[in-house]
Image (tube, rainbow, N blue to C red):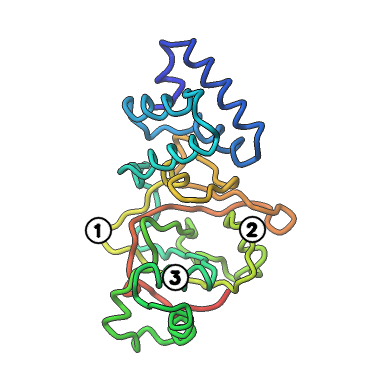
Amino acid sequence: MKVDEFLKSDPIKKAKLDARLDTLANISEMYQRFAANLFAENSLTDNDWRELVEILLNDNLSIGKTTFLIRNFCRNDRKLKGKDAKVLNDIIYGRLVSFDVFCQLLIKLKYYSTLEEAKAYVRYQIGLDLGLMDEIRKSQQLGIYIMWSTFDPKGDDPFGDPMPDVEELISSLGLERVTSPYLLFEYKLPPNVGPKIPTICDSYAGKSWSRYFYRVGENAPYGMTTPTDTSLAKEGRPEVVHEVIKAENLVSPLRRA
């Protein structure tokens, strides 16, 4: 259900919501994108919209408090609720993550206690033959909460062949450049994990909201990224979200972008 359908019998509340979202959209590009994505969202139930609209129409809330409550709303068992993505079976997925972010993730997951330990582990893993990975490392998670990934709809290399330079790749995936080097992960999903089309609850459950997330239409087979710099990448790439997988699902050694 879309929000317009939810509010079709209450034009006064619909007008208030439009005005509230117009106010948010004037604050920044990020809130402008949020407003557009909200109207495009179709995975929420009647009760979901009732709760979310109540948050948005509360005039006593600051922008910061509103954002906080929306984030909690998205986290409340509403992630990975989008439609199943229509992709080929046995497809290879790709994920681009900054070196520093992945090391911090390993610490958050309590695999390592210091940044130095995590960095040493990751450097050791780069280029390491998968056959040399021990059972402990195979069991390590590659993400937390949910994972976002890209792929080639025809089943080819998820990053392209030949792969574009790293600046174009970062932009095409809707990521903002950081100073840290980047890592490339390539993997297949286990049988019990399926790719989903990203929703606003997947995108806005995190601490930082991206102004480049684009909620695709109802008939889209999968999500699509929005380039962060069209001078580097003219178009986005297919994207999906899925449950967290482990290193045992990798199909090629970890490598630098």
Secondary structure under tag 1 reads loop
Image quadrant containing the C terminus? bottom right
Image coords of residue 207 (percent x, y): 48, 50
Tell me the residue that label 2 is attached to.
171
Tell me the residue that label 1 is attached to.
192
Pick whichever of labels 2 and 3 is earlier in the sequence: 2
Image coords of residue 210 (percent x, y): 56, 48
Name of the residue lying farthest toward the right: 231
In the rendered image, which quarter is residue 1 located in?
Answer: top left
* Separation of marks 2 and 3 at Cα, in angstroms: 19 Å
Up the image or down, 64 lies above or below 125; here it is above
Residue at 35 percent across and 89 percent down: it is 132
Up the image or down, 161 lies above or below 237; here it is below
Up the image or down, 32 lies above or below 184; here it is above
- Residue 186: give its label: 3
2 and 3 marks in contact (CB < 8 Å):
no
Question: What amino acid is at disc 3?
Answer: Glu
* Separation of marks 1 and 2 at Cα, in angstroms: 31 Å
Residue at 37 percent across and 32 percent down: it is 44
Pick whichever of labels 3 and 1 is earlier in the sequence: 3
Residue at 47 percent across and 85 percent down: it is 120
Of 6 and 227, the residue lying toward us: 6
Question: What amino acid is at disc 2?
Answer: Ser
Of 159 and 231, the residue lying toward us: 231
Total marks shown come to: 3
Secondary structure under tag 3 reads strand
Up the image or down, 207 lies above or below 32; here it is below
